[in-house]
Amino acid sequence: MDATAKPLRIPPEMAVYAEEHKVFDIIQKMVERLLVDRPENTIQYLIDHLRNDNDEVPRIFALGPPASGKHTMAKLLCKRLNATHITLENLLSNDVSALVKEAHSYKDKGQDIPNELWDKLIQERLSKVDCVKRGWILEGFPRTREQALLLQMNGSIPDHVVVLDAPDIVLIERNMGKRIDRRNGEIYHTTFDWPDDPEIQDNLVEPEGISEEETGQALLVYRRNIPGILRTYLKVHKKINADQPCMDVFSQVLTFVLSKPRSVAPYTPRVLLYGPPGSGRGLQASLLSQKYGLVNICCGQLLKEAVANESKYEELIGPYIENSQQAPNNIVLKILIERLSRLDSAMNGWVLHGFPRDTEQASLLNDAGFMPNRVLFLDILDFTAIERLSYRMTDPVSGERYHSIYKPAPGVDVHQRLQQNQKDSEDQVQARLEMYHANAEDLEEFYQDVIHVNADQDPYTVFEFIESCIIKPLPKSVPGDPASP
């Protein structure tokens, strides 16, 4: 787009709607699937993709050496996430599939099933309705980098790869105690998971390949192949120590698979700083503006600039500024909307302070389409606010600001000429504090997702906390999540 043709005003509803409905993330997913699947009928493909509404379903690979517990973890995850459990064994259980019959022909001859055939079997299974709608957990596959690349090229791409691991000596001991129910293939263990039902006990058999020598050989093959597999899934895998109690391992696995990758969708910070006088809103806004390029919008300063620049609002708000009175909401809102609607605010984001002061102003701001996505309350005690403000004075010669406690004047001559702003007198500060307390609770209820910040600290410590609240997404706890606090 020609830079000179860019609009001077971008409707705020656009960004709010896009973020609220995850428009950018949806488009990103659609483009990813288009590049992978390359359908002939693009429009119909995108329509079907949106109808499936399955961007959030789990797509997980559960990997690990023999006896690492990947089967148990996969079963627990499927139950917790209502996903489809896929194993190499149940892939071969579909009697009507031509691909399955082909795979059995290889097994009957004692030959390995080719990687290309495994890939087709998996593609066939993942295309079924239950996998599309509920998601899936594929256990024990891929086993080599070649298999991983083949799956990736054909669009079977996981969002999370769980990699369980434990020392070889532990795995060998576990594997030697493994037993299988010959009726249904369920796995038990002589030490860790022995069934109470005598009937089940009678049906347990020792599986093939669990001797110490055979397990050691299988571990050697796994250790040789796993580095190449993990290079294929570099940013979506996590190694988890399986030499722990089962539920501890599951808690870590669940926490990982519930995590979301960082979105590359454009994010425009719209930050509102609210707090009593002396809480440091101006300083924190300035620090955010310097580091992240946010437009620093102080409502009081904006009104003064409107008067100083002889704007169309000069005659309307000039008398209020001169008499230190609050200007009418409708005029303040018009000036504020003009500033928030400029291209730099829409593109870079903004940090607003000094407005709103009450729920009426907050409602007017929201109705105009300017809804902050971070609301931070800077909290300090009244005593601290009075101490910070009523003891500060300004040198009329140099313009330097001093404080009787924190930054005394360097000499007697400077101290004698210091002047205090009338609004910083203890009576004025107390009156402003009373106004703040009269509205704080209602504003907190209005915005709901308010983040409280202890502002009675070093300003850079306060800034670090504010920064962490802005650059990270808002936490979303999952009901029933054992990893949730």
Image: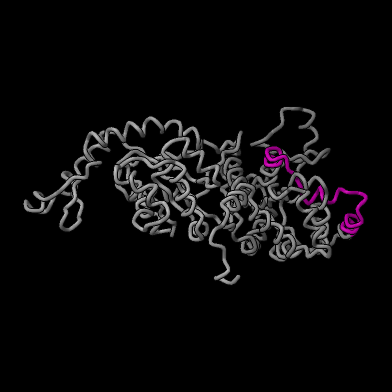
Q: Is residue 92 magenta?
A: yes
9 or 407: nearer the eye? 9
Q: Residue at x 31, y 35 (%)?
A: 432
- The reply, left or right, for residue 80 in relation to residue 284 is right
Q: At which x and y percent is residue 422?
A: 22, 42
Judged from this view, the residue extending furthest toward the left is 412
406 or 210: nearer the eye? 406
- The reply, left or right, for residue 433 in relation to residue 39 is left
Q: Is residue 472 magenta?
A: no
Q: At which x and y percent is residue 181?
A: 79, 38
Judged from this view, the residue extending furthest toward the top is 197
Q: Is residue 171 visible?
A: yes
Q: At which x and y percent is residue 2?
A: 58, 72
- The reply, left or right, for residue 456 in relation to residue 225 is left
Q: Determine whether 29 is above or below 439 in the image.
A: below
Q: Determine whether 344 is above or below 126 in the image.
A: below
Q: At which x and y percent is residue 311?
A: 40, 56
Q: Main secondary structure of the magenta part?
A: helix
Q: Is residue 169 visible?
A: no
Q: Residue at x 16, y 53 (%)?
A: 395
**Which quarter of the figure has residue 287?**
bottom left
Q: Residue at x 32, y 46 (%)?
A: 321
**Which quarter of the figure has residue 429?**
top left
Q: Determine whether 201 is above or below 153 in the image.
A: above
Residue range in magenta is: 76-105
